[in-house]
Amino acid sequence: MGMKASQPRIGLSGVAGILAPGTRNLSDLAAAGALSSSPATLMEFGFELAHMADATTGVEELAFQAATAAMADAGLQPHEIDVLIWASARPENHLCRAAAPASDVLNGFRYGSAWLQHALDLREAEVMALAQQGCSTMFSALRVARSILEAEPKRRHVLCVGVDVLPPGAPREIMFNVISDAASAVVVSRDAPAETWIGYRQISRGYYWDPSASGPEIVAGYFPTAKALIDDLLAEHGLEPTQIDAVVPTGVSRASWEILLDLTGIPRDRLFVEGPAFGHTMTSDTFLYLQQLRAGGRVPRGSKLLLFTFGFGSSWCGLLLEH
Amino acid sequence: MAFTVLMTGATGALGPHLLTELLRSESIGRIYAVVRPSNGADPLGRLWKGVAALSDGSGTETRAGAGAVVPLDGDLRLPRLGIDDHRLTDLEREVDVVVHAGADTRFGAPAAELYDTNVHGTGEVLQIARRCARLRQVLLVSTACVAGTRTGSIAECLERREPRFVNEYERTKWQSEQLAAASGLPVRIARLSTCVGGERSGYVHRAGAIHHALRWLARGLVPMLPGAPGSRMDLISSDVAAGWIARAATRAVEGVDVCHIAAGTRALALEDLIGFVAGRLRQQHAAWIAGQIEPPVVVGAETFELFRRSALSTGDSILARVVESASAFLPGLLYPKVYETSLAERLWGGPLPADCRPTLAKVIDVMCADGRSVRRETEETHV
């Protein structure tokens, strides 16, 4: 399906997601002034709590745990990773916590990607990072990973690590989503046995570049653009909406997924939502759900999966996989 | 013999178009125009402004300035429209035709306010008409929306049985029709479909729901429209509507006559209309030219309601206003219908000009020149 004979069989060989261990319920968050909407409204949207990092479990620890788990899921040793791609929606999460004063310009070069390579002993890996894609940054990381594997036959495994942690005391609600801290990691491999890559589509619309000034436009623009993307992606790969067996969502409002599925003609029962609610983690939602899907075993092999996300910027991204 | 006309709604959305067409008619002499007082503004000046905006250089405004139009301070919500006794005597002696085009057209307005203007106000107009010794006709300007949620072919006849309505505006206009029909006076009911604006320049005297919707659409604030297979949006130019009324005002009527001033079978399918609007925006609106905004998607009732509730739950004021206003009239699209127009066309003398696209294109150019400059206008009462 959409795969040419000459193309390598590329897929996701390892998937892991790690939520920050601390949690606070909506009432606590509201009392702390961290929410702009009422807890009742956010409950109606499907949110229950936020996972929050603390002094002992921050960006580095979450990234380390997710990367370790993904490599274990793929059955790989650190030296087998050819490329490491660090991804985060927020600029501060590209840097490690600094001991030196903030005025030290060298603090700005304490890259999380380099730290992770060192901490995991990814001695063979080439390192890079992706930013400015909002919640779709990890999707772009996967896309780059796949392109590297296609273009460079000697590379076999690319480890993508996404991590997002809000600063201490920051608001926990972004455009009606309750934000959790988390990390995720995906190993994109040549000859992966499952989650085989079928196709990818991205639409980027700079008109919506400023979420502070264009909130209503973004909410309104989300649906027709998402529909256009999914329609195009399915058509490009000869798939009817009803042939999608599972939609792996992000942790945003449940109602928004039902609306989107109605718009695209994908039956609502194809939405894969299992496990306890964790809010919205920016880059990691999809992979927290995908991890559950892989572990659950209830989605048959060969099923067509649609992964979809939206990121400020704004970019809409869709990824088709064969489970 | 030239007819003397008493007119309401002269400063409303259709008012300048209607006044212009009445002035152009050689069969019409004096026009008494009821104008609601507005902060000391000169009533003739207010009428003049709209007529001048539509001027095509044919001298219509000269005739208006020469005294053919007599403004009367009045208000549909007041007994006898608040017109003083002296003037009422003039009207009772002179008026041949009453053109009642005044209405509160705010789809989302409180029911009591709509009733006051649209039903009670019509009752007051009929009372005055009853006392006019030379009365030949009351021409009630109504709306095709009185069909409410009925579907299929909508006949040009009075609907005695009250249908379900999408909003209270529709209900009060249906009630006003019933009132007029029961008056025993010679009544012609002109049910207009949605008037988009002037043909020559796209002039819109007062923005209505369709114009607000176009502005929101230009800005990318309309992600979806409710619709059903076969849904059409029936649009006509304001000039066609006004021209038909001016012509009908001098034609004899007996009993109750109902006509649809509508595109009828030639109304655009909803998807085609969206495609046309999007195509126009892609020619002249920066964000659309750059392909940044997707046109709205047509969805069923359940999905639209889910979106409406979600949008309102967000508490975002702009989105809430767009969704609430849109919800007051867009759900009418869920009930596909085609307005019969044969009686209107018989009076017109042929098919009504039904292709609204040239006019709509001009209106889009005027209304949506810059999507970012959408003003947060409040809808006003049209009297």
Image (tube, grey):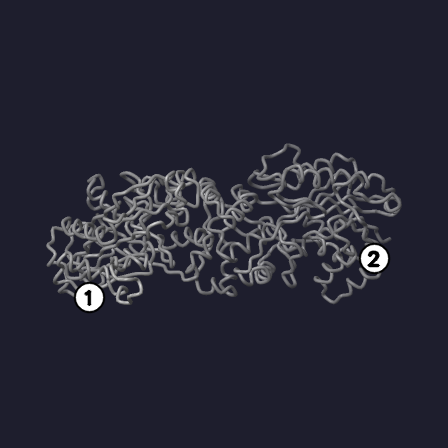
User: In the image shown, does B231 or A42 lie closer to the viewer?
Assistant: A42
What kind of element bears circle 2?
Answer: helix
User: In the image shown, does A152 or B348 lie closer to the viewer?
Assistant: A152
- Residue at the limit of the structure toward the top, as seen here: B161
What kind of element bears circle 1?
Answer: helix
| Residue B113 position (above or below residue B290) | above
Q: Chain under label 2?
A: B
Q: Residue at x 81, y 61 (%)?
A: B65
Amino acid type at mark 2 = Ala
In the image, B238: left or right of A217?
Answer: right
In the image, B93: left or right of B61?
Answer: right
| Residue A123 position (above or below residue A17) | below
Q: Residue at x 73, y 62 (%)?
A: B52
Q: Are marks 2 and 1 in contact (CB under 8 Å)?
A: no
- Residue at the limit of the structure toward the front, as seen here: A101
Q: Quadrant of residue A134?
A: bottom left
Residue B197 at x, y = what percent? 64, 57
Q: Quadrant of residue A24?
A: top left
User: In the image shown, does A121 or B351 lie closer to the viewer?
Assistant: A121
Q: Chain under label 1?
A: A
Q: Residues within 10 Å of mark 2 (few under 14, many from 20)?
A: some
Q: Residue at x 26, y 67 (%)?
A: A106
Residue A75 at x, y = what percent? 11, 50
Residue A121 at x, y = what percent? 12, 58
Pointer 1 residue: A151
Amino acid type at mark 1 = Ala
Pointer 2 residue: B68
Q: CA distance from mark 2 to mark 1?
A: 81 Å
Residue B13 at x, y = what percent? 67, 52
Q: Residues within 10 Å of mark 1 (few under 14, many from 20)?
A: few
